[in-house]
Image (cartoon, coloured by chain):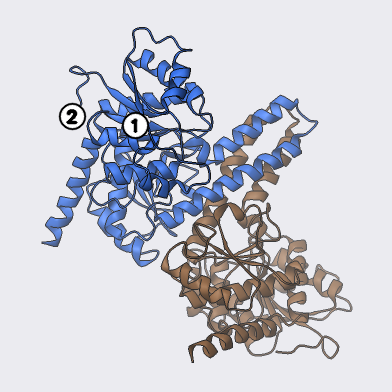
Chain colours: A blue, B brown
Amino acid sequence: MGINKQDKVIKIAVDAMGGDYGPPETVKGAVMAAREYGVEVILVGEKEAIDRELSACDTEGITIRIVEATQKIEDGEEPAFAVMRKPNSSVSLSTRLVKEGEADAVISAGSTGAMMVAAARYLGTLPGIDRPVAGGPFLGLAPNTVVLDLGANVGCQPYQMVDLAVVGVVYARTFLGIENPTVGLLNIGSEEGKGNEQVKQAFSLLKESGLNFIGNVEGMDIPFGRANVIVCDGFIGNILVKYSEGLGRTIRKWISSELANQLPEDRIEEIGSSIYKLLSPAEVMGGGPLWGVNGIAAIAHGSSRASQIAGTFRQVITAIETDLVGNLLNELAKVQAKREQKNR
Amino acid sequence: MGINKQDKVIKIAVDAMGGDYGPPETVKGAVMAAREYGVEVILVGEKEAIDRELSACDTEGITIRIVEATQKIEDGEEPAFAVMRKPNSSVSLSTRLVKEGEADAVISAGSTGAMMVAAARYLGTLPGIDRPVAGGPFLGLAPNTVVLDLGANVGCQPYQMVDLAVVGVVYARTFLGIENPTVGLLNIGSEEGKGNEQVKQAFSLLKESGLNFIGNVEGMDIPFGRANVIVCDGFIGNILVKYSEGLGRTIRKWISSELANQLPEDRIEEIGSSIYKLLSPAEVMGGGPLWGVNGIAAIAHGSSRASQIAGTFRQVITAIETDLVGNLLNELAKVQAKREQKNR
């Protein structure tokens, strides 16, 4: 896409109807971001609802455009199917603006599943990536460790695990600022030759990939953050995400009752909330671009308030300015060329 | 084996050389158990070392026998190979006493790997079970939930997952006292048809198994204890065990520094230790019979003191008195007969 911030203003489409609070927060957040970052915002959704919110904001000197979404995803509709059926719903339409070059990126606080389907359908995934992945640092305990895939890519071919590693590396570089991220393969032992056929073959491919591959890592190595990028099949990643989420909730409950009457209530609440954030991937991830998509499509937490919507803009702008998609394509092409050379 | 406690005294072989503390604790523990439970004990190991410890104990009125082990597993030997090479080492020999009908069960606080190999080599595994499994409740958070396999059986055939479920059910009944344990299949969604080929096929087989199968469970359901028996491939189970262990350690460290100077030091230590026990499978499991073995071979924690050695006797005696192995064989035969009937 080759956006050059010197030449033209960055344009970001926002699914104004998405999120638990809808236009009152998405519109306010978009206005905040437009002012703070000097970007142009395209608000996509019901014109009336957006106008109502805009009229309460100070929009002087910023550029905001409305694109009307003529279809609406109703409560109870399966989001993924609704996206396909309704190309003029706010999430579909805002994503299509990216495809058509009208916007440089799209942000939605709506259903993650809907955004993933919209991104896959309208932007497509990068070569070797089956489905877009929502990712990022996985545990508050290990802020410099990214785990993928977390459930979108189940039953990976070994070569796909290398592609996932590339995606993780480019993200760790872009968003965590790690120059040469280490890559580990999640396995049941540290020695080469351990595990099932999938990981044995992936191990060989990763060794020859040119990535900074440090070998197998074990379950224990995730909370200790022993690699920056940890690759696993989506079947395992999904179980780990949900397991961690469950632990976050149960341990929070346990510690709160354990500390009752021993510390002030707000301090207990603070500790419970911290422990939940340390353990819960849902808390740590959330805002940020989908991974492996041929374009920049970002999700914000469903419960985002205006300031969190604006925060997601920051990540999206970084992705645009560093040419995230171009970098990903380059890096994927490199490992894929190596693979073909070897197969020849 | 049909041991009848009315007719004859239960005989238990003890690997006297096993465990971090060796004979000083194993011998004392065995003497305690012999007195408390009225069982006969066969101490297997170096005669001199055992005699030395026995001479310091009151052995009046209890029956203790020594069987000399003429080989020794040295520090640094790979335990699994050492067991094969040294049939007269204490762990091998004490297990062989069970095989030969000289003892009704064996207990070792030595290497778990060595005990697993000795059990597999000398007692064999039950039909459908590839390797013995060390199991039990998995998380302190969910004391009535057993997860298996935890790493011994990697790359299970779908029918093997049914056999693992049977093992879990019989154990939950025997050791947790749950009449009709619920069985869940660990998967990435709750609906039938989710997941990879392995779990899709295992789902169908479990549905027809006659077990109390409640369908798929997700990662979140483990800490919430939503099934009594949760079945997964050993590849995933192993990653979950080690992941939990890592979380137990890191969260313990975090909470200790978080509470520093806010609560008395011993109270902080207590909370840290509890949180570790809630999260760490190594703490929760440990003492108890290996699963799926054709005989009763129990492991005690490596760090066991005399009282913990004696505690493991209690579990072993329950296993003998309830005819654990006979029950397992019966239940396995039932699901296997159903399977054959269907395949005919």
User: For the residue labelled by badge 2, is the local secondary structure a helix, a strand or a loop?
Assistant: loop
Label 1 crowd (10 A; few <14 / some 14-19 / many >=20) = many
Give the CA distance from mark 1 to mark 2.
17 Å
User: For the residue labelled by badge 1, is the local secondary structure a helix, a strand or a loop?
Assistant: strand
Q: Which mark is first along the chain, 2 or 1?
A: 2
Residue located farthest toward the right when viewing the structure as drawn? B61
Residue indicated by mark 1: A106
Q: Is residue B223 left or right of residue A16?
A: right
Is any part of residue A261 visible from this angle?
yes
Q: Mark 1 vs mark 2: tell me if same chain.
A: yes
Label annotation for residue B138: none
Give the percent coordinates (x, y) of residue A4.
19, 22
Q: Is residue B308 left or right of residue B334?
A: right
Is A83 placed above or below B309 here?
A: above
Q: Is residue B120 left or right of residue A54?
A: right
Chain of the residue that carries numbered disc 2 in the rendered image: A
- The residue drawn where x is 62% and y is 75% is B167
- The residue drawn where x is 72% and y is 72% is B180
What's the residue type where badge 1 is placed?
A: Val
Is any part of residue B71 visible from this angle?
no
Q: Is residue A311 left or right of residue A64?
A: right
- The residue drawn where x is 19% and y is 17% is A6
Label 2 crowd (10 A; few <14 / some 14-19 / many >=20) = few
Nearer the observer: mark 1 or 2; the answer is 1
What's the residue type where badge 2 is placed?
A: Gly
Judge by depth and name the residue closer to the eye, B176 or A63.
Answer: A63
Give the percent coordinates (x, y) of residue A210.
22, 47
Judge by depth and name the residue closer to the eye, A124 or B161.
Answer: A124
Residue located farthest toward the top when viewing the structure as drawn? A60
Judge by depth and name the residue closer to the eye, B172 or B244.
Answer: B172
Residue indicated by mark 2: A2
